[in-house]
Amino acid sequence: MRFVHTSDLHLGRKLSQISLLSDTEYLLEQLSKLVERSAAKALVVAGDVFDSPNPAEAAVRQWDRFITRMAQLEVPVLVVSGNHDSGARISMGSNLMALSGIYVAGELKDEIAPIVVDGVNFWLVPFVRPADVRAWATRMELDAGLVINYDTALRMVLDHIRSLPAFAERPNVCVAHQFVTNAGVSPERSDSERLSLGTLDNVDCRAFEGFDYVALGHIHRPQRIGKDEIRYAGSPLKLSSSEIEQKKSFVVVGITQKDEGVRVKYRLVPVEPLRDFRMERGSVEDLVNRAKQEDEKANQDFVHAIVTDDDPIDVVARLRRVWPNLEQVSFDNAITRAAGAEEVRSEVDLSKDVVDLFREFFKAQTGKPLAEDEEKLVNDAFEKVLSREGDLV
Ligand SMILES: [Mn+2]
């Protein structure tokens, strides 16, 4: 059987205050077409359906339309919560939705059972924290004291799944939303994933031993972890400038039945963005000229501009005129190079002469010392100000 694996839709997200709903609409359209075209028997969404535990109404409507469409196509949708989702809210009505083939695991249930599609077990493991698993372990009369971090928490849930009779009966796909590492090697990360504090939130990929395919969500760069069958689908949209170079994709997974000897194959299907997110570098004049040669659609892209002028004026306004969705401006010029070379001072030495302080400030801002005429101008100005200091209070 074949299924499609995606994750981290982050519906309702904004980029630089600009709504991405038209972009997510465009990708959901591609996703439903891919499901039809590839004759997939199921669609897996491995968490972070929404960008926030309280998603915008328009995002909720978008998801509602999408799952309704999938139900009409009679393709089961298998969803787990991610760290951005509220597990309780996304599983609202889940028992009813299951009657229409939309399976949402928002929270860890006592009775864990696979969703069986076309002879394959899909085990939906919602995003859980160690405290959730401790509570679950107590209810299940397991030793909650064994849960000391994410790794031991996930292992306890997965051990339980492996002990269930259904596990031996069919090929097994695990759907989870966690930070999975391979022998301490971290996946390649992006700025748009919400990091938790510390480094104890990882789960080693060996925790998934025995599963034929592990459909992961959380990390936004598509990648395998340890082996091809343990895989992050990645977010279908570029959600931060650290993702500009990433090739976003959906995964189409093929899995054979037990009597054929379980084999797994996969292929990556590129996602075409409505508006791309790219980086452009040059002087403001170069950038504006470059934009003018591009077509109207390309100019709607999100752009992170790296400006190289030493004395740029009115940068954002000039660039916004050609790129209305300018996402970020950063500078690589004499000033930033000088700042990078020198130690950044976080404190100002107030015992210093105020003109000396200004000289330092000027050099830090422009990368060069005051010229002779500027020196005179500054001295005169300070003299004037300081002589009337009493009046200024
Ligand atoms: Mn995410």
Image (tube, grey):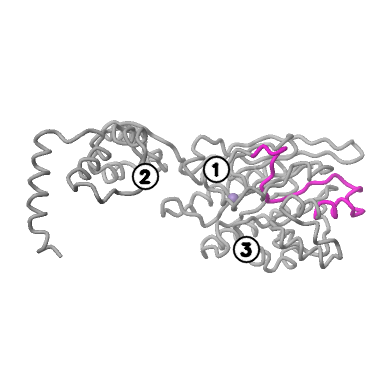
Boundaries of the magenta span: 157-186
**Seen from this angle, which residue lies furthest front?**
351
Report, in whole angstroms, how far the alpha carbon at label 2 lies from the one at label 3: 31 Å
**Membership of 173 in magenta stretch:** yes
The residue carrying mark 3 is: 86
Location of the C terminus (image quadrant): bottom left
Q: Nearer the viewer, residue 331 or 286?
A: 331
Residue 76 vs 284, above or below: the answer is: below
Q: Secondary structure at mark 3?
A: loop
Q: Residue at x 9, y 48 (%)?
A: 381
User: Disc 2 vs disc 3: Cβ atoms closer than 8 Å?
Assistant: no
User: Disc 1 vs disc 3: Cβ atoms closer than 8 Å?
Assistant: no
Residue 326 badge: 2
User: Disc 1 vs disc 2: Cβ atoms closer than 8 Å?
Assistant: no
- Density class for disc 3 (Cα within 10 Å; few <14, some 14-19, many ≥20) is many
**Membership of 24 in magenta stretch:** no
Location of residue 102 in the rendering, given as x and y in whole percent from the top left corner: 71, 59
- Mark sitting earlier along the chain (2/3): 3
Residue 190 badge: 1
Q: Secondary structure at mark 1?
A: loop
Q: Amino acid at mark 1?
A: Ser
Query: Viewer-nearest of labels 1 and 3?
Result: 1
Q: Amino acid at mark 2?
A: Leu
Q: Residue at x 65, y 46 (%)?
A: 6
